Image (cartoon, coloured by chain):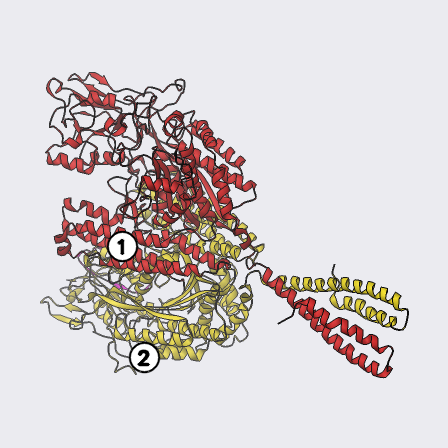
Chain colours: A red, B yellow
Amino acid sequence: MVPPPAQRLQRTFPPATRRSCRCAGASGTYCFAMRKESRFIWWIRWIVIVTALLLLGFTLGWFAKPTHPKAANESPSSKYLKDFLEGMQPDQIRQHLRKFTRLPHLAGTEQNLRYAEQIRKEWLEFGLDAVEMVPYDVLLSYPNKSQPNYISIVDRFGIEVFNTSLAEPVPEGYEDVADIVPPYSAFSAKGQPEGDLVYVNYGRTEDFFQLEEMNITVTGRIVIVRYGQIFRGNKVKNAMSAGAKGIIMFSDPADYSAAGVQPYPDGWNLPGGGAQRGNVLRLDGAGDPLTPGYPAKEYTYRLSLENAVGLPNIPVHPIGYHDAIHLLKNMGGQIPPNNWKGTLDVSYRIGPGFKDDFKSQKVRMNIHTNSQVTRIYNVIGRIRGAVEPDRYVILGGHRDAWVFGGIDPMSGAAVVHETVRGFGLLRSKGWRPRRTLIFASWDAEEFGLQGSTEWAEDNAKVLQERAVAYVNADSAIEGMYTLRVDCTPSLHTLVYNLTKQIASPEEGEEGISLYDSWHKRDNWTADRDAPRISKLGSGSDFEAYFIRLGIAAARARYTKDRKTEWYSSYPVYHSVYETFEVVDRFYDPTFKRLRAVAQVRGGLVFQLADSQLLPLDVNQYADSLGKYAQSIAREAQKHPEEMEMYGVSFDSLFSAVRNFSVAAGDFHERLQSLNRADPLQVRAVNDQLMYLERAFIDPLGLPGRPFYRHVIFAPSRHNKYVGQSFPGINDELFDIKNSADPKKAWDEVKRQISVAAFTVHAAAMTLTPPA
Amino acid sequence: MVPPPAQRLQRTFPPATRRSCRCAGASGTYCFAMRKESRFIWWIRWIVIVTALLLLGFTLGWFAKPTHPKAANESPSSKYLKDFLEGMQPDQIRQHLRKFTRLPHLAGTEQNLRYAEQIRKEWLEFGLDAVEMVPYDVLLSYPNKSQPNYISIVDRFGIEVFNTSLAEPVPEGYEDVADIVPPYSAFSAKGQPEGDLVYVNYGRTEDFFQLEEMNITVTGRIVIVRYGQIFRGNKVKNAMSAGAKGIIMFSDPADYSAAGVQPYPDGWNLPGGGAQRGNVLRLDGAGDPLTPGYPAKEYTYRLSLENAVGLPNIPVHPIGYHDAIHLLKNMGGQIPPNNWKGTLDVSYRIGPGFKDDFKSQKVRMNIHTNSQVTRIYNVIGRIRGAVEPDRYVILGGHRDAWVFGGIDPMSGAAVVHETVRGFGLLRSKGWRPRRTLIFASWDAEEFGLQGSTEWAEDNAKVLQERAVAYVNADSAIEGMYTLRVDCTPSLHTLVYNLTKQIASPEEGEEGISLYDSWHKRDNWTADRDAPRISKLGSGSDFEAYFIRLGIAAARARYTKDRKTEWYSSYPVYHSVYETFEVVDRFYDPTFKRLRAVAQVRGGLVFQLADSQLLPLDVNQYADSLGKYAQSIAREAQKHPEEMEMYGVSFDSLFSAVRNFSVAAGDFHERLQSLNRADPLQVRAVNDQLMYLERAFIDPLGLPGRPFYRHVIFAPSRHNKYVGQSFPGINDELFDIKNSADPKKAWDEVKRQISVAAFTVHAAAMTLTPPA
């Protein structure tokens, strides 16, 4: 041990000095000898001291230097998170929403490009490092301006005795606005089919089965279905499969009105003249229908329209309930089951055709909608990561709207705008995230998630290698009750932890966290004592990132009370009545709910981008996999004889899940002893966390759906809004009762169990020590 | 500035000492004051000195400490490389080869498992960290032991008047060896077809076209083709497509004898009784025919035999030329083109059937080969990486042999064994590679690359994320002339640099490098003034790694003189005459050629595993892409009218290649200013280098070949041994002349150009700065 320098100095030097002084008055030679000896000792001592001091300094220097120069950067993240969450302002969100909802901005229109340019400009002003416009040329679909779409009742001479309205009554304050696209079904086939109507309730698989049981065929007829319950594209597909030559969709008040609420503008219910626009594609993740698998660039090969992906080959048209009454009121045929009845003052008879005096009347659809390749624009902004610029955290939401987009999507886009402003504020304080942040304003979501999917296709390679997570930002509000989160299991823990740091936006809940407010309102009792989190389905831009590429994903919004509010979506959904005012007056007058959503979405990307260790919970994934496996096995066990007969067993899947749980537990344990000062060790572990979601991707895709490649999660084949676990097995089991060849069907179940078991094993392998 | 410590010491202390001495005999008070003052100054000085020394030490400590603790590990790599290369011994390789060629060890047999266990044991003794046996249950194919396969000539009564031999004459010294499998075509269909023979030369696409032009049909007939030029599976496929009901393959001396060389055992030519075994599958990368896309584990779902991938549905059988003479000598029909004639003393008439008196004779095939699911074993060994254990460099080669495997594969396996021994020696000196090294002894390569493909499928996720490169180790020698290397363009530079550090093994070339020897013997004049390097095709275990997963790959072996030695492969290929002696006596008596191959293969994996910066050259990839694009465009321009008519242009591909070249150039330039002391910067750049090859993978695969996914390289559809660049375009162009629907065919060319252009753009994007 080296004694402290001060001590050593006193011990050594003063005596040496004194000793040589004494010499001067005494025996010279002796003294000289003494002097020589003491000089020698003096030098020795000197060398020892100098060496000791240098060594001490060296040691201090060595240990004072950080092992990794950037480690110092990492600690104040949580302080910045607090600043960031507090920096987001309701007023600002209100202003953003106001600004971007004045004019219709349908994908492919001039106005939507203008908003894109404005967003680009403002994001740069907020302080992003770079913002670019990224165009693609994709297939969109618009009504023909000179030949409007409508539906007629024609008499036996072919004379149109009733026509549906050509547009919705324009809401107050917007009378002078041009370019409001009338309600239509994007990508409808053209045509003027004429025939008897058949009412098929929601147009679900089970509704068509019911019809079959009632011995009513729709072949060569026009079906009329009510909106709701499932994605409209699935209704159209079902109608086509059943042989219908046209399909009309209407919004029944039973599905689009809340009790005790007035129609817009006096309340937030859908007026009778309002109708729901929407695309009727069955893309299954393909993006642009002409360039499946590849980005729609100038040089890209395009399929012919006949070979385009997912386009229906029958005319489709949406109407409001005022018009629907006219089509329904004189229908004849059988009386429907009770659960087929909406709340209009009609009998909901199934048809086919009209009754009594109206028997000779037919329905004629007049559809002239055109598909055309059109330029769209994504806006992509970035903040470069300070430590790991090659790791990406993405916050993306669409900008294109059917009309004003008051809720869908601008409530979400305003939230993204505020999030970007928030990150800009942090940047101005000198902060820079550990990883790169990417912000996206997608185009043409309403036409089949095209902007986001084309960009994912364009950037597939780098995203596959570098994307940590994708947070989606569609409509931020669809109700006034509580938070709603859908995300991958590994993000549950982060969502819970984050919402505990955010205040409840509800009046009377001051001092209560968003977590507690949410927990109280929507306890996930069936799973655990915590707020409910759902599986991701589809219907918004996370699809390509999560289900095709296997990037951990989440979405969050404010929602209605699922226990009492049974209407589909929100009443004015995709109508002209989705204005700024519907949010400002009814959904969120203080804009605190939107701020809370901004804090959740922004907080998620903040923590994913800035935490040294990625906040992804592998144990939670293991837990969820266990539950999904149990659940799918229970589903199959409804057919015990067949399982016995065809030798179907879930043992391999259960065994794989157990293996995964052990690997996840061990991984989690090793995390505790990770040397966080070693940048390569941290990077390696983060890579394992990042790539875990990727491990669930099967490059061969799900059966018949090459772009749905996630073996654990995919939209249901029967309703793309619903997220299914183990979709490969699930889809087969759904169809098994009606299968013409049960042996083959159960064989496919076996194959899917084998694929699922393999995939879970492979994912477990990614969590074991790499060598 | 702080003066050096020695100077300061002299300047300060001796005077201070002297001064205080003088005091002793002079004025006490003054001296006392002086003393007080000097004490003060003394203390000041002391503090300055101590501080200075500490500071100096601190500074030294600070700068002495490496920025990254492991950086210190990295410099002596080249010294270890030298040790490693010198450590590999010809004698040792000879011993390894001797040891593993004593007994037949066909895939799926007891003996091949024994060798696997022995390899596992010895690799552990050599010093690997871990070695495991990895089993799969795959579809193999064996002759029926109780019903031998043979071919007969039958007379009009159906009596067999000639039968081909049931086995090859066993070479001297091996008379008592059991379990030599007779020559057969693995995965042949069973059956006893009978009919007229048609001779179709090599059975290539062009040979069948020629036959068509001559108005000779093979439908319902048995074709006889000579081995050589293309992969036998392609011959079988062509025969099936043409409607043949059986196919016989023989080895013509024209293709399996070197001039002036005696048949084995007096030389290395194929004796007349020898025949070439081999599988006749068309797997296109699927691995086990029953589990395409997934590893053949116990729980894996298996296709039925009827749905198995790539099995021919006609009987196939190989014979030697002694037997072939009997089948050919009496053939009638047209005289063949001159280039259809081999060197047997027969007319090579095409048939169908026999001539003159023999007209009533038919040929009957008697094939009873069985397919069965069989357990196979890979041996997988590892040396854990010291710095980046989660980066893998793989050296793999197969162990299973048709009989003894003297050349194929044990010359390669002996080289791998010696390489492992070499790495073990380094380990014993305390060395550990920067990245993890994986060594593989694959099983069932001869049955369609099954062991390597199943392992690739099993580990696809981790390989995709972590594998830096794959070096293949099949037969290490097929000639006595010079080196032969096939590899991805980014490895060219490493191969050249490495071979400059290896000595030529040729007698009389002492002091000359392998590079110079190779350069002199096989100058790649058409491309550059350097030794020729070829594209990877298929036919060995790198396939799944390179063409399915996109891992940079290379193979190297010693070869014949391509300018003068025109025989296919090497004469005794896949016969019982592939013994230890054929190598020991003829191919490499000093075992220096095998050592050189060991040094190349081992040196490649050493440098890939141990260099701080990955030795992958992106500029070389750019250069090669440019040449491939030129070449494919030239090919298309043979059809100028069609290109005009259908609007086919290569502009987008050329533009993509230019874009890639710029990105590669910029990347290379940024490498020069990389801060190599920052481990995350180095990691990020290495990730870009590693993932470049991955960027060429299209998850949708090539048309009709889902497991061939590399857009730049794939085996030709017409001969899997040949590596094609831009295979998607190439394949289409090959067929275009014979297409029934030229518009559709040229449309597919356009689509393939678009896919190629996109892929090259996407690859360029991976090389740009990540944010």
Same-chain status of marks 1 and 2: no
Q: Which residues, given as a range, are shown in magenta?
A: B216-230
Residue B555, compared with residue B114, is above or below; it is above
Q: Which one is in front in this view, the residue at disc 1 or the one at disc 2?
A: 1
Q: Quadrant of residue A452?
A: top left
Residue B203 at least partly seen: no
The image quadrant where one finds the N terminus of chain A is bottom right
The answer to which of B493 and B108 lies nearer the viewer is: B108
Q: Is residue A299 magenta?
A: no
Three-letter amino acid code of the residue under disc 1: Val
The residue identified by callout 1 is: A755
Which one is in front, A381 or A650? Answer: A650
The percent position of residue A511, horizontal first and vertical second, equals 42, 39
Q: Give the residue at x 47% y 30%.
A: A91
User: Which residue is labeled 2 in the image?
Assistant: B102
> Looking at the rendering, which quadrant does residue B451 occupy?
bottom left
Q: Residues within 10 Å of mark 1 (few under 14, many from 20)?
A: many
Q: Is residue B106 left or right of residue B15?
A: left
- The answer to if B229 sits in the magenta stretch is yes
Of A170 and A375, the residue lying toward us: A170
Q: Position of residue B514 (x, y in %)?
A: 50, 70
